[in-house]
Image (tube, rainbow, N blue to C red):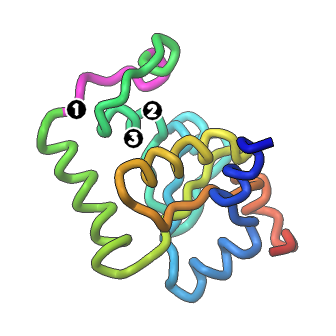
Amino acid sequence: MAAASNDAKLEISAGAARELVDIGLAVLLDIRQPFELELEGVVENAVSVPLFRLKQLLGRTLTEEEQELLDADEPDERDFQHFLSLINRHHVTQDQILLCLCNSGRRSLRAAQLLRDLGYARSLSVREGFRGWITPNTPP
């Protein structure tokens, strides 16, 4: 039961997330993999940071499957600095909430928690994911 309670604190509905983005209070971090963006489509003005790349940039260990999906080398210091600069530009400088979006809302929970673990307290997961985002009448 505690896990469900923690998830609720990390989630926001697609409708509420869209409103925050529309008024400039939040930035959308699309954590889907590049092949998902090609298959499903991109979200206009979202910042693409695939979850596995995010985990890699944060120094977290990737599973073998994640590494295969990512199919990339280890990030170097410049990659990490670029990532922190990007996140800080939105979260700190512009005081925006970081909204993580995946396909269904499961991976984005992990991404939001990773960001919170780094000290980005205003990080949330879009509960319904991309599917909810593209459905215009998702309730808040």
Q: Farthest residue toward the left?
A: 77
Identity of the residue drawn at 27% across and 52% down: 83
- As drawn, the label of residue 54 is 3
**Is residue 98 or residue 44 the one in the foreground?**
98
Label 3 CA crowd tier, 10 Å (few <14, some 14–19, many 20+): some
Identity of the residue drawn at 49% across and 72% down: 97
- 69 in the magenta segment: yes
Mark before the other along the chain sequence, 1 or 3: 3
Identity of the residue drawn at 60% across and 53% down: 101
Amino acid carrying mark 1 in the image: Pro
Label 2 CA crowd tier, 10 Å (few <14, some 14–19, many 20+): many
Q: Farthest residue toward the top?
A: 64
Report whether 118 appears left or right of 129.
left
- 36 in the magenta segment: no
Is the residue 28 above or below the residue 103 in the image? below
Q: Are marks 2 and 3 in contact (CB under 8 Å)?
A: yes
Q: Which residues are magenta?
A: 68-75
Q: Quadrant of the C terminus?
A: bottom right
The residue tagged 1 is 75
Q: Are marks 2 and 1 in contact (CB under 8 Å)?
A: no
- Residue 118 point in image, percent of width and height: 35, 51
Q: Secondary structure at mark 1?
A: loop
Q: Farthest residue toward the bottom?
A: 23
Q: Are marks 1 and 3 in contact (CB under 8 Å)?
A: no
Report whether 70 appears left or right of 79.
right
The residue tagged 2 is 52
Amino acid carrying mark 3 in the image: Leu
